[in-house]
Amino acid sequence: MVRKINVFDTTLRDGEQTPGVNLNFEEKLQIAVQLERLGVDIIEAGFPAASEGDFQAVKTIAETVKGSSVTGLSRSVRKEIDAAWDALKVGTEPRIHVFIATSPIHMEHKLRMTPDQVIENAVDSVKYASERFPHVQWSAEDACRSDLDFLVRIIEKVIDAGAEVINLPDTVGYITQEEIRHIFTYVRENVPNIDKAILSTHCHDDLGMATANSLAAIEAGAGQVEGTINGIGERAGNAALEEIAVALKIRNDHYQAETGFTLNEIKRTSSLVSKLTGMIVPNNKAVIGDNAFAHESGIHQDGVLKETTTYEIITPELVGVSSNRMVLGKLSGRHAFKEKVQSLGYNATEEEINRVFKEFKRLADKKKEITDDDIFALMTEEKAGE
Ligand code: KIV
Ligand code: ZN
């Protein structure tokens, strides 16, 4: 049986915490509408108590977006929960995301609270939130560096207080795949009322393991995955949702789980987020980078031209890219060169191809990438010499 994994997108909240990124009201709305089209289940539109701008953006997104559930972040503070309610009550399914830190480091140095005070505070805020909101998500900030038995205690109590989603973030991107599988399994096996809640995973990318860790949490029973488009976010960023959705699709045989993403909206969503945030997507980024479907070496080009699956595990069309791309350079072979010449409209004989291919190789030694204009010039010379 294939499990449906809910996708919680925090591009507009955690993603906006990317240093240097500051989206205006219209830009946030544009991104939210595209996230809805992509098939995101829950959009975290911002932190309503943080500023008047965030409040207005969350409110307008909650009013506008009807195909995804819209949520906003709040600390465990009644005034912030009130602000979130004022912004979100217009939505079809008002949902709040309340959090408090549970790791010894955060409780002692940041909150300056004892573990019992943290439990009291978490329970109070979840109760207060659930008197207003039909849907309450609670997050144990820095869960992956928290004491497991403390997590079990607090989770049981916040579920009793009304939380229906329990999020266990790897706030500092520290965990390994085996460890996160253990945390999720331990919580599922030891929290007596866990069946009343959905477990959620929210990984940061400080060690470059956010996608792998999110997938490991899904293997261990997470029913919701959180992240951002293009993996933007605080420090090294969040888990990249497009990578997770495509990994679940391509390796469905292994994960037996899927998201509700309309996968061919991925490229368009990624480009919009990149354009509006100014965060350039590296060419070699998985799934959405410009080189994700480009082939340069002659051996690869020849293989792909004969049968795409030799070197492509994802079809470009799956994620909304029109086609793969043969990069013509010094490593390219005659097969890819001939295809290119033909695709540009030339009806060349085998001898012509052989002659121009030699010229092409000479040029490619001096130039990193051969463009269509270069091919036009080479073919024009060849035809002139006939
Ligand atoms: O990374 C984190 O712990 C967070 C929480 C606010 C959920 O973003
Ligand atoms: Zn986060």
Image: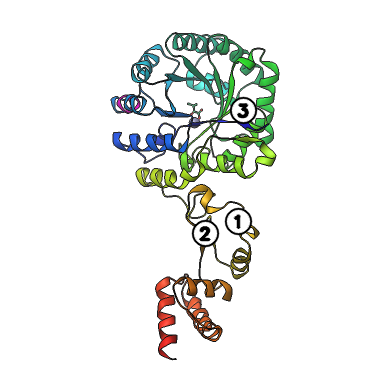
Q: Quick check: 16 above or below 191?
A: below
Amino acid type at circle 2 is Asn
Mark 2 Cβ inside 8 Å of ligand 2: no
In the rendered view, does 62 fall on the left or right side of 4? left
56 inside magenta stretch: yes
Query: Which mark's residue is nearer the viewer, 1 or 3?
Result: 1
Is residue 244 visible to the viewer in this orientation of the structure? yes
Numbered tag placed on residue 183 in the rendering: none
Report the residue marked by disc 3.
222
In the rendered view, does 188 fall on the left or right side of 384? right
Report the residue marked by disc 2.
324
Task: Check contact, mark 2 vs mark 3: CB within 8 A.
Answer: no
Quadrant housing the C terminus: bottom left
Q: Nearer the viewer, residue 149 or 288?
A: 288
Q: Please, what secondary structure does the residue beneath circle 2 have? A: loop
Mark 2 or 1 closer to N-term?
1
Amino acid type at circle 3 is Ala
Amino acid type at circle 1 is Glu
Mark 1 or 3 closer to N-term?
3
Mark 3 nearby-residue class (10 Å; few <14, some 14–19, many ≥20):
many
Q: Nearer the viewer, residue 220 or 280?
A: 220
Q: CA distance from mark 1 to mark 3?
A: 29 Å
Q: Residue furthest front?
A: 347
Q: Residue at x 40, y 39 (%)?
A: 19
Is residue 240 visible to the viewer in this orientation of the structure? no
Q: Residue at x 45, y 77 (%)?
A: 346
Which residue range is magenta in the image?
A: 54-58
Report the residue marked by disc 1.
312
Mark 1 nearby-residue class (10 Å; few <14, some 14–19, many ≥20):
some
In the rendered view, does 45 fall on the left or right side of 165? left
